[in-house]
Image (cartoon, grey):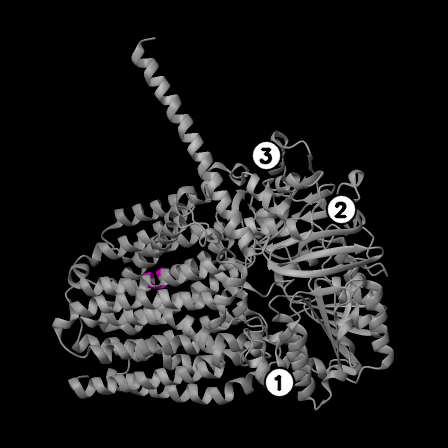
Amino acid sequence: MKQIRKNPLSVFSLGLHSAAIIAYQLLLMQLISAMQGYHFAYMVISIAMLGFGAGGTFVALLKEKLLKASGWLVPLLMSMTGFFMILSFYLARIPWLQLDIYLLFTDRSQLGMLAVSYILYFIPFFTGALAIGILFIKNADQIGRYYFSNLLGSGVGGLMIAIVLNHFFPLQCLPFIAFMPVVASVFTLSSKKRVLQWAGICMALTLTILSLIFPGSMPRSQYKGISGTLNLPGAEIVAHIPDVKGQIEVVSSSALRYAPALSFTFAGEVPVKKNIFINGDFYGVIPHFDTSAGNIHNYTTEALPYIMAQRDSVLVLNAAGGSAAAHALSGGARHVTGIISTRGVKNLLREGFTDGFKKAALHPHAHFVYQDSRQWLFTPELPRYDAIVLPRMESFGGSTGLNALQEDYALTLEAFQQMWDLLDDGGVISVTTWLDYPARTSLKIAASLAQTLRNNGVSDVDKHLAAIKSWGTLSFVLKKTPLTPEETENIRSFSARMLFDPVLLPDIVKEERSRYNLLEDESLFTYLDAIVSGRQPQLLSDYDFHILPANDNKPYFSRFLKPGTFKKLRDTFGTETMPFLELGYLIVWVTLLQSAILAFLLIILPLLRLSRKGGNKTPTLVYFAALGLGYMFAEIIFIQRFILYFGHPVYAISAAISTMMIASGIGSLYSERLPDALKASRMSTLIIALLLFIYMLVFTPILTTTIQLPLALKVITAFVLLAIPSFFMGIPFPAGIRILYRSQEDYIPWAWGINGCLSVIATSVATLIAVEGGFSAVMIMAVMCYLIAFAAFFRYSTAKGKK
Amino acid sequence: MPMYRQSFLLTLVFFLLTFSVAEAQNYQRQRAEMVESQIRGRGIRDPLVLEAMNSVPRHLYLPSAQQRFAYEDRPLPIGFGQTISQPYMVGFMTEVIRPQKEFRVLEIGTGSGYQAAILAEIVDHVYTIEIVDPLGERAKNLLNRHYDNVSVKLADGYYGWEEHGPFDAIVVTAAAEYIPPPLIRQLKDGGKMIIPVGSPFRVQQLMLIEKKGEEISSMALMPVRFVPFTSSD
């Protein structure tokens, strides 16, 4: 093998190629989300990423032939990667190959389309991984610098696409991303083959230009929210904005009105409002800024905090388009602070997209802050408020679907505690939700508010909580001091005027809960009473859905499904409705299952072939599997923690991934200087386990202490905190490869494949562990993985006695 | 014409006739089974509703590609991101308004036209409004062919159909986050409205609204998914 010619430029090629693959992965996520939905995108990408495992298998099976042909094969594979990045996406859009994921449960032919989609998106990852695998084996003696290049490229690629997607649409980016591996391929060619080099560049340029001229369309499922909306009379897309979270589109139509759960007594005209969609899914509306007494929210249960008593200073978290702020002003508030956290929506409003918001921004009593709501709660020396208003649940931004497993730090017990600390003595926290059946959001809100009261030494919770319901919504109010008779009287008379029903009051009478708006199933009241009294904890823990409060360790407010309740949900709603329900939790399980089956095949297959060639399979399998899992577990924890720290998932992901990749890359490069690979692997795995254990104890306290620092200092803190373990985490993989290179060279591609497969599986596993056991449980798992890796090669040493 | 050609033609005509009769009989059998197992079997007892569902050929209200699934226990796509509701849901929504022969009923969201056809079998007159033009045109042609007591309008259902109100019952088959005030105004005293409410992009509640003088009350009946899919029971 060592006689094979090596091209020094291939290190650079590898970096460029790796950057393109990561960028393509993130790009594909957006493209598929926009056409079919985030659920499907997540499943497809997980399968596609197994292309890395398959690449390892392929190299393991045909190593000698591939190495012999590597001079032309690597550039060819890189070019094919770029080519298939475009072709696969093009083919997946051909009508007779096109899947409609929403029909999967009703139309069996869609299963075939699903398989076609898996294969199409798998190809570029497979060819890309194959090229990387061959380069790794070919340069196993210099694996440190090649792994460095791979990690650095991946880090830069991820960061690059996160920035680019804020300014360009995914379809515009695709040709440029596809161009990168083709360019990378040129650098892997020998300098003697200049004709081929130029031919390659010309071909890539042609491809890029053609893709730019003919980008094609993005056929969306007819069941995406935006598709139905565009069928309305005069419907048109009036704004289209790129955003890293997804393409933002604003649709205008004379038939789009907005007045959630309006009282039957409202006799006016329901206002027409534009709808906002992100990746084709409904996100919210652009509201009017109506500060008059005729504000439509005064005819909804959201008026609850304002009809109880006068509120002078109001804080509106996740203020979105400003309608809740306008509502506060219409209720007589003199100081209203609105926190707006969605970048794309912020831009819509800032650019004066709505006259209404201009009015809001110029209103003398309104003040808007562009920041994440939870972040803002950490601001030192905030004033006190008469009312803190949270947005209506399941409306702006949604909280179901795959979002069910999205962290929401604004709805944890710690967040409610911060809100409590900001309340004046007579102040209230107000939350509104749609009435859901089976009840879950409403119960979890009640549980969170009741627990907040108990955490602050309030024993008579029922005296501090009020709730009213209309035909569609349920609004809660938590009051710092007990409700006064005057306030309860105000609530009752408002409810009677609006045909609403009081649900929680200190002196509530059973009959008044169902006077105007009857529920077929009144178990909602039984559970609410159990939550308020705190006397039946078993009843709540036995409930079909998770309704216990979320906390910063498990910030999944919208996670309601329990593994055993899926069948019940299916029986209630019907199988065909499943794609629209809270599938996030289930999708992670399905993804884990399909990834695990394929990963098993990809690992077992070469194992059968390698079985003739000697021992040490188990230590190799365990070592590289543990590294794959451990690295991803740690990475996911760092990302989750940084979401709270930076207040923005995209910044958190970018900061964590790029820092880890770069620091690990440097660690990998440094590992080449360590002459004893076995010792390097043992020491590094042990140090990592120790560091992660220490981080388990100190990481969160450090972040909480420094969260109020200016952004630049926070970035430096995050970099230092992450770079230390990440540097060491870059050592075990190349050290392991070097050990194999000297003893079991045939195992190298297989080991790389194992590592890749387990990295994919780890993302689903980590999510499930985090949901069930919290972030600390995932961190313990990461520590365990590195200890297992340490032990695995300890056994290897005993068996072989080689270095 | 030579004899053999005549024979061939006759055979072909006979074959086609036999086939279409057999197909019609097959649909009729499927419809009877549907009523028995999906409608009566799930507790719909109103004889007017059962008779109507037995009479209306549901398959005619579907695009040809979907006709063979017409009597299955599920909603089916009819294009434009819309569906024909599951048979049980149509039966349930019809029964819950307690239709009488003298009723004038307003339907918001004609869709395929099937719900309007079921109502037209029972009540005096059905006024139905569809907002998606191509769907409304298709349904209008079908309904006009079979019924003279159905009026179809292509418009925004928000405003109802004031000149024909007030109505004994209003059936809304499109989800809404609000109940349009004009529809409440166009409901007779003692009238009933059935409507799926909640965010149109999520699971909704099927709601029965009753008007008694100045007092209006609601009753949440079951969770549903109206755009694009309806729930089972």
Q: Height in image: A672 above or below A64?
A: below
Residue A708: image location, x then y, percent: 63, 81
Q: Magenta segment, principal secondary structure?
A: helix
Which of discs 2 and 3 lies nearer the camera? The answer is 2
The numbered mark at residue B138 is: 3
Compute the Cα span from label 2 to label 1: 46 Å
Q: Which residue is mark 1?
A: A536
Does residue A339 appear to the left or right of A707 in the view shown?
A: right
The question of residue A482 being in magenta is answered with: no
Q: Secondary structure at mark 2?
A: strand
First along the sequence among labels 2 and 3: 3
Of the residues shown, which amino acid type is indicated by label 2? Asp
Residue A604: image location, x then y, percent: 23, 69
Q: Which residue is mark 2?
A: B168
Dot 3 alpha-carbon crowd within 10 angstroms: few under 14, some 14 to 19, many 20 or more:
some
Which of discs 2 and 1 lies nearer the camera? The answer is 2
Of the residues shown, which amino acid type is indicated by label 3? Arg
Query: In this rendering, does residue A8 appear at all?
Result: no
Does residue A27 appear to the left or right of A379 in the view shown?
A: left
Magenta stretch, residue numbers: A13-17
Does residue A291 appear to the left or right of A74 in the view shown?
A: right
Q: Quadrant of residue A10?
A: bottom left
Residue A705: image location, x then y, percent: 59, 86
Q: Height in image: B170 above or below A312?
A: above
* Nearer to me, A504 or B209: B209
Residue A44: image location, x then y, percent: 41, 59
Of the residues shown, which amino acid type is indicated by label 1? Gln
Query: In this rendering, does residue A719 appear at all?
Result: yes
Chain letter of mark 2 equals B
